[in-house]
Image (tube, helix red, strand yellow):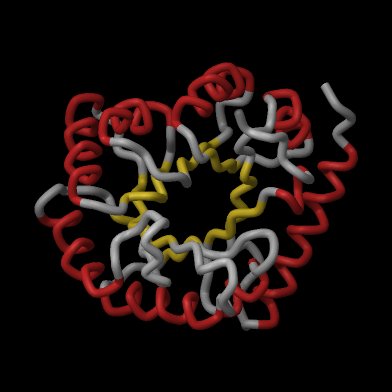
Amino acid sequence: MPEASPIRDNLARVRALIDAAAAAGGRPKGSVALVAVSKTMPAAIIRAALASGHRLFGENRVQEAEDKWPELKADVPEAALHIIGPIQSNKARRAVQIAEAIQSVDRPKIARAIALAMDETGRRPDCFIQVNTGEEPQKAGILPLEADAFIRACREEYGLPVRGLMCIPPFDEDAAPHFAFLREIARRNGLADLSMGMSGDFEQAIRFGATFVRVGTAIFGSRPSQP
């Protein structure tokens, strides 16, 4: 296992920044959850974060999560996993079985598949609706004009436990308007949780009400190349 101290130090630094941003917005300590994004990181690196006391992680790919997390959870049962990347409907059941939350519910087909998997397995991980606030054709997420109807369908038609919303602003734009936009969609739909903000902008996201921030490189460093 790699030495835990660099990751422990990085986690402490990120948590301090989260607490400071929350305090600046008049929010209590502990009101923002840190999702340590461990995608592409080997299990040994994740174990260093677990040894440092961190318990909430995010993975993009269901297959990668299945390769790493059963053993990690067996060793640290209180560890929680969020799926934060797009999933295919044929992997919905596997996502439901391994995750405590799915942050990338973004279209009716996947909502139906997740609902069916929940009925079959009896597991009901929290769901976040991913909104494509920048309307980028290459990016996952329900379009903003369709968001209200989709949220309603996820709740009423599919019976999903919708906890909040998630977004990934365009890389080359100011993230603030996107965070404000997502906050407004959540407000009018009565959703309390917002997953927004990554390593480069999580403090800004907290100012706009983020309750979950997804931070990877600021904790783990540069990611290994994916095949």
Residue at 42% x, 76% y: name it. Answer: 183
Q: Is residue 17 left or right of residue 113?
A: right
Q: Image quadrant for the C terminus?
A: top right
Q: Give the image quarter of residue 45.
A: top right
Give the percent coordinates (x, y) of residue 172: 59, 72
Q: Taking 6 as reference, is 108 above or below it?
A: below
Residue at 42% x, 71% y: name it: 134
- Where residue 91 appears, x then y in whole percent? 32, 29
| Direction from residue 63 to residue 44 in the image, left or right | right
- Given residues 106 and 99, the one toward you in this image is 106
Q: 84 or 73, which lies in front?
A: 84
Is 50 on the left-hand or right-hand side of 198? right
> Does residue 102 lie above or below 156 as drawn?
above
| Residue in view at x 33 percent, y 68 percent | 191
Q: Is residue 41 left or right of residue 16?
A: left
Query: Residue 37's image quarter?
Result: top right
Question: Where does the image place residue 176, in percent across and percent down from the top left?
Answer: 55, 80
The image shows a total of numbered marks equal to 0
The residue sitting at the left extreme is 157
164 to 61, vertically: above or below:
below
* Image point (37%, 80%), residue name: 184
Which quadrant does the N terminus fall into? top right
